[in-house]
Amino acid sequence: MQRIMVVDDRAENILAIEAVLERPGLEIVKASSGNEALRLLLRYDVALVLLDVQMPGMDGFEVAELMRRNRKTQTLPIIFVTAQHTDPSYAFKGYQSGAVDYINKPFDPIVLESKVNVFLDLARHREELQAQLQEIRELQSQNEALLAAMGDAILAVDAGGRVTFSNPALKELLPLRLEPVEGHTVMDLLTTTHGLGERESWMTSEIFMGCRYGQQVEIKEKIFLRHGQELVPVHVVARPINTADEAFAGAVLVLRRLVEGESALQTQHRGRRLPRKSVSSVLRVFDRTNGRNLGRMANLSSDGFKLVMREQQALGTIFSMSMVLPETLSGCNTMSFEAELVWCQPSEYTQDFRCGFRVVQIADSDAHLMRQLLDML
């Protein structure tokens, strides 16, 4: 529903405008004075004001000037309706006070409707854009929450190898003297040599040489993260931001620390089997709509799963969920699905709630990840 306001001290003029513009989906807010118009503008959101210039008391120019001083109405388009159109200075005063257009009395119904439709379309497009921006902000918030929750360190680099983003997990691996890492070259942090003083060129690195052609690069051994005077062995997976037929724009790197004396291959093999009793320590589930941590996994099967949650939830509630995986599977760190809460009961020894869910919707790619995860348990 869109609204416009018509302000005129003569009821017959308002009726005439209403007869031309009245239609489904359009509400006309009527005011017979400037004071009434200003009061109603604080109550209603309108897309356009049709404002009579000649009114007793507060005229249209004064109303427009007061509207421009109020934050809510300062950008609201105003079309002046006037019978005085011969004096150029009169029109100039109207534009100075905030008018975007004039309609002369007696008005042509076709001209009136055409001009009003232009501003209604602009208002509709503006609302759609604001809704899209809000959706983008929500998605950004969700992505940031998931990246912050991941156990793996995440780095994003531009085409020149300069770090543009890092998640909190990286702080556990880096010395304080390199914080923030944004702005550093990634090869200041990584090395494939054993010498702390040596710096490999980004342009000759294995990561760059593969990612620039749109290929994923995985370095399983002999790559280290510089940690003060130490070299920490890591497992690195780098994915290009570009595709094979586009200009190279950068890469996203996932870094996982290796246990001392253990090869990446051994880590990968070790990660293929997770005891079911330890699932709660590695699997976290988040609400995709707001990024909130819903709880830790207590059990996972092909039929559904159990979560330990801090708050009781209403049965039958459908949640949009994302799960942070214990390791990268098929190039993914998370999987998403819709799940219904089928039972919820308080824990026996804690203040938490044990809740059972069944998956009601999952994409084929995420279903494949679910099967891979089940094979690891």
Image: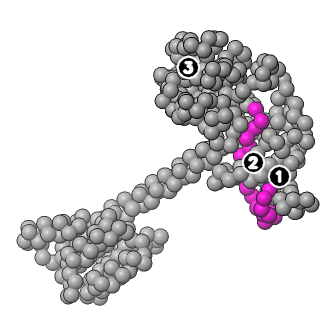
Q: Is residue 32 above or below residue 351?
A: below
Instruction: Give the residues drawn in magenta, as a range.
Output: 309-327
Amino acid type of disc 3? Met
Marks 3 and 1 sit apart, C-alpha to C-alpha, by 41 Å
Badge 2 element: strand
Please name whichever residue, 8 or 98, is drawn nearer the observer in this view of the structure: 98
In front: 321, or 101? 321
Q: Nearer the viewer, residue 372 or 191?
A: 191
Tag 3 and tag 1, C-beta contact below 8 Å:
no
Q: Which residue is mark 2?
A: 285
Q: Which residue carries the number 1 mark?
A: 307
Q: Secondary structure at mark 3?
A: helix
Question: Is residue 49 one of those drawn in magenta?
Answer: no
**Residue sitting at x 76%, y 45%:** 284
Question: Residue at image x 54%, y 33%?
Answer: 179
Local packing at callout 2 (Cα closer than 10 Å; few below 14, some 14-19, many 20+) is many
Q: Amino acid at mark 1?
A: Leu
Label 1 residue SS? strand
Tell me, yes or no, if residue 185 can be seen here: yes
Residue 91 drawn above or below residue 121: below
| Side of 17 relative to 375 (left or right) | left
Q: Nearer the viewer, residue 195 or 39?
A: 195
Q: Are marks 2 and 1 in contact (CB under 8 Å)?
A: yes
Q: Mark 2: which amino acid?
A: Val
Residue bearing the label numbered 3: 187
**Residue 282, position in %: x, y?**
80, 40
Residue 168 in percent (x, y) is at 62, 39
Please tell me which of labels 3 and 1 falls first in the chain: 3
Circle nearer the viewer, 3 or 1: 3
Query: Which residue occupies 86% across, 37% down?
Result: 374
